[in-house]
Image (tube, helix red, strand yellow):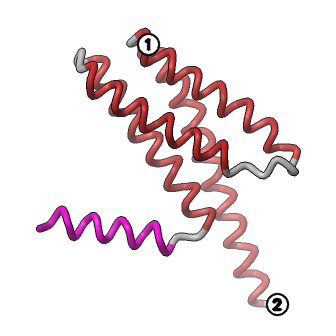
Amino acid sequence: MMTKQFQTYQNNAVNTASGPQLTMMLYNGCIKFINQAIKAVNDNDHETKNTNIQKAQDIVQELMLTLDQEVEISKQLLSLYEFIYFQLQQGNIKSDVKYLEEALAFITEFRNTWKEVMKTESSSYVQGAQV
């Protein structure tokens, strides 16, 4: 029963989230799955490793698809996302955490940067409302 309630809560969170919040959820999910994959590699659990890396790759692909190619920085981000995807792929093929840790470092940095952007944006909205 509790699992169904939690799934309903998660679905509502996704359905009511703004675009920036959804991006944050994607970054957080990717971090979670990479960490689980690293643990699985260390535990020699190949099935769990593969499942979690595939989930992380799905998220990276979603991040690539959501880029606005009209914006110059999107082209640079696309190259970085492709690199992260490749690192995940290598980590899966070689069962080597160094590739996963490198992908994790990039995604974590993106998530932290995105968090700061969200703070700046929400601060701008609040300041604009006070004027």
Along the line of sight, the residue nearer the viewer: 42 or 54: 54
Q: Residue at x 54, y 27 (%)?
A: 103
Q: Is residue 75 left or right of residue 57?
A: right
Task: State whether the magenta stretch is mostly helix, strand or loop.
Answer: helix
Q: In the rendered image, which quarter contains the N terminus?
A: bottom left
Q: Is residue 22 left or right of residue 53?
A: right
For residue 48, which numbered disc appears in the image? none
Which residue in the protein does label 2 denote? 131
Q: Quadrant of residue 80?
A: top right
Residue 45 in magenta stretch: no
Q: Is residue 129 left or right of residue 42?
A: right
Q: Earlier in the sequence, mark 1 or mark 2?
A: 1
Q: Which residues are magenta?
A: 1-16
Mark 1 Cα-neighbour bin, 10 Å: few <14, some 14–19, many ≥20:
few
Amino acid carrying mark 1 in the image:
Ile
Mark 2 Cα-neighbour bin, 10 Å: few <14, some 14–19, many ≥20:
few
Q: In the rendered image, which quarter contains the C terminus?
A: bottom right
Amino acid carrying mark 2 in the image:
Val
